[in-house]
Amino acid sequence: MEPITALLDEILEESRALRDGAPADYIPELAVADPDQLALAVVGPHGRVRAVGDADAQFTIQSISKPFVLALALQERGREAVLAKVGVEPSGEPFNAISLEAGTGRPANPMVNAGAIATSALVVGDEIDDRMTRIVDTLSAFAGRSLWVDEAVYASESATGDRNRALAHLLRSHGVIDGPVDIAVETYFRQCSLLVTVRDLAVMAATLAFGGVNPMTGDRVVREEVARDVMSIMASCGMYDFSGEWLLRVGLPAKSGVSGGLVAVAPSQFGVGAFSPNLDGHGNSVRASSVVEAIAERFGMHML
Ligand code: DON
């Protein structure tokens, strides 16, 4: 094993002892996840993926889709059109909070559910399929391979997603969503159900780290300023009501998802993907957070 891979393996194994938390169960299909799964991948400027643990385990991307669909909305619509519908302030609230700015009805930021539903509604296309084609193509370009939806997880979330549907209705009542609520919310559920591995997450994060160019494929996925905007919002809002403490302790833009995935970006250096299903009270993976914190520490990656 190369020295760097051995070091990643050592970091991963240190976090295996953490037994706190539990898989998300408000989406029934996520509750069946094997809580012992643990994986880590890192991608540097040459696009080479170094991965340890259950690196080929597939899981649904969930909220980690949010920064990448935001990138698509920024790319297609521009910053001002996106800011007209969703803010960029940390909410200090849980991911599923009712988030409506007084006066405008804008959700606090695109990382909480309400803001992500508003963002998905900005993706160009009249029907769910049109929007999903753009979303799948964009997230696949970020990952450097073709991604697809886990239909069982999608059906499970759609069958139980009353809170997100309610958020979408509130957004529409304020004119934040223009079109039909169902199209916005089902598109959002489908984007959350895309299957990924930690390798994919690391390549996606690295594509942001290198200004919108995928270092594995060499393809430009989004404009440089779009990648910078997305990383800025991940830094302030990506870990929900733990974002401030995360920035203090780890110092990297990051985004978590309720299936246990986590991406972190060291701008111009690395993309990191980590996964383990047990979550803490903020909805962030206990072990994935600890692994990324340890990497940032050992490699001196804190931005400040
Ligand atoms: O909308 C939801 O509740 C899920 N599809 C995604 C939430 C999520 O991943 C929160 N992250 N930790």
Image (cartoon, rainbow, N blue to C red):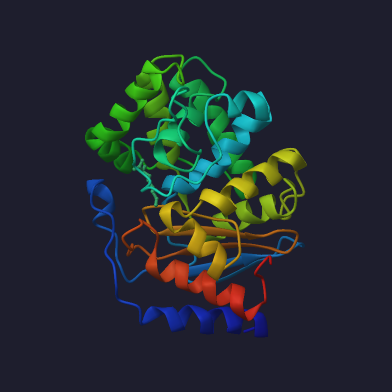
Could you tell me if residue 150 is visible in this image? yes
Could you tell me if residue 54 is visible in this image? no
Residue at the limit of the structure toward the front, as seen here? 102
Q: Tell me where residue 71 sits by quadrant.
A: top right
Q: Residue at x 59, y 56 (%)?
A: 253
Answer left or right for 248 relative to 279: right
- 249 in relation to 185, above or below: below
Quadrant of the rendering where the C terminus is positioned: bottom right
Q: Which residue is drawn at 60% across and 73% down?
A: 296
Q: Position of residue 243 (x, y in %)?
A: 49, 57
Q: Position of residue 78 (x, y in %)?
A: 68, 27
Is residue 52 or residue 297 the one in the foreground?
A: 297
- 47 in relation to 159, above or below: below
Q: Where is residue 28 in the image (x, y as percent from the top left)?
A: 22, 47
Answer left or right for 41 relative to 168: right
Q: Residue at x 59, y 83 (%)?
A: 7
Answer left or right for 18 relative to 5: left
Number of numbered discs overlaid on the protein picture: 0
Answer left or right for 115 relative to 217: left
Q: Where is residue 190 in the image (x, y as percent from the top left)?
A: 40, 35
Q: Tell me where residue 70 sits by quadrant.
A: top right
Quadrant of the rendering where the N terminus is positioned: bottom right
Q: Residue at x 54, y 77 (%)?
A: 294
- 44 in relation to 125, above or below: below
Is residue 14 or residue 150 the one in the foreground?
A: 14
